[in-house]
Amino acid sequence: MRLGVAIVGFALLFLVILAGCIESSKELRVYAGAGLKKPMDTVIKEFEKKYGIKVIPNYGPSGGLYAQIVEGQPCDVYFAADWKYIEMLKEKGKITESRKFLKDFEVLVVSKTGDSKGIKSHEDLTKEGVVLAVADPKAPVGAYAERALKNLGIWEEIIEKDNLKARPSTANQLAIMVKNDEVDAALDYRSVATMYGLKYVEIFPHNLTGEIIFGIGIIKDGNKDLARKFVEFVLEHIDEFTKYGWEAYERS
């Protein structure tokens, strides 16, 4: 009898150890808008350290990541820089759970050259010889910027004067161009400008850009339990994001 109890006890212990090994060998695939990279990398490192779970991040334009998910690329949780992509994935039945995450703003950032040219507001973007960068509209940062400039009534003039010289695909690429003095000015997220230590001279309100809301979606065909654990961990460490200029989303 004692031998039988011992065998059962050993078997249970083996199963617990095996379950722990299986859990630690799991991988979590996180898709996130490129602008989130710096704080997200920090949170991922802490998550891996605490839970022993390998996290594989995929950073890029939110629209491009959305397309990958629609095509069936493996993903467990998606952090989008535009809430519309979460809604679109819901409509396609790709997401089981979602929540609004962060709020951000578009700002006008200037390089050293732009500063020397006296660029102080959006009104200066129509001056002769200004070198402006606005992201590709497939990236939310580009779509918001274009909408703001159109609402301000200066988009067509910027195009006519050939002041729009670059349309990179991510917010980070915009920031690097400004930091390297490759352009005079760009419209970028306040959070990204803060990360890169860039000077910004104007903040565009949401009535010009539309609401800039970052969202989280747990993918239907992914590891939902592990995704929920990671989302909970991210929310517990939201200060990693807000210190760069984002605001935590609060329901009204």
Image: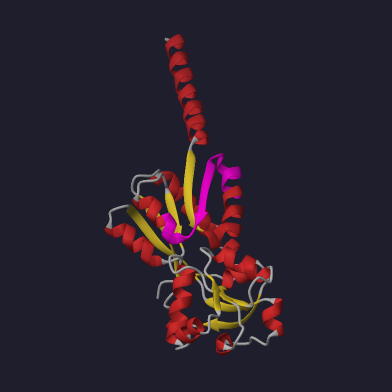
Closer to us: 13 or 56: 56
Q: Quadrant of the N terminus?
A: top left
Above-or-below relation of 74 to 110: above
Give the x, y percent position of residue 191. Answer: 58, 69
Q: Is residue 62 left or right of residue 237?
A: left
**What color scheme is it?**
secondary structure
Q: How far from the left and from the top, in percent, is residue 6?
A: 47, 14
Residue 104: image location, x then y, percent: 51, 72
Does 150 lie within the magenta span?
Answer: no
x 48%, y 37%: residue: 26
Quarter of the image holding residue 111?
bottom right
Segment tinted magenta in the rendering: 46-65
Which quadrant does the C terminus fall into? bottom left
Towards the viewer: 37 or 60: 60
Q: Is residue 63 above or below residue 212?
A: above
**For residue 238, above or below residue 54:** below
Q: Nearer the viewer, residue 219 or 233?
A: 219
Which residue corresponds to the image point at 63% horizontal and 74% vertical from the top-left?
Answer: 183
Residue at the image position 46 percent from the left and 83 percent from the top: 155
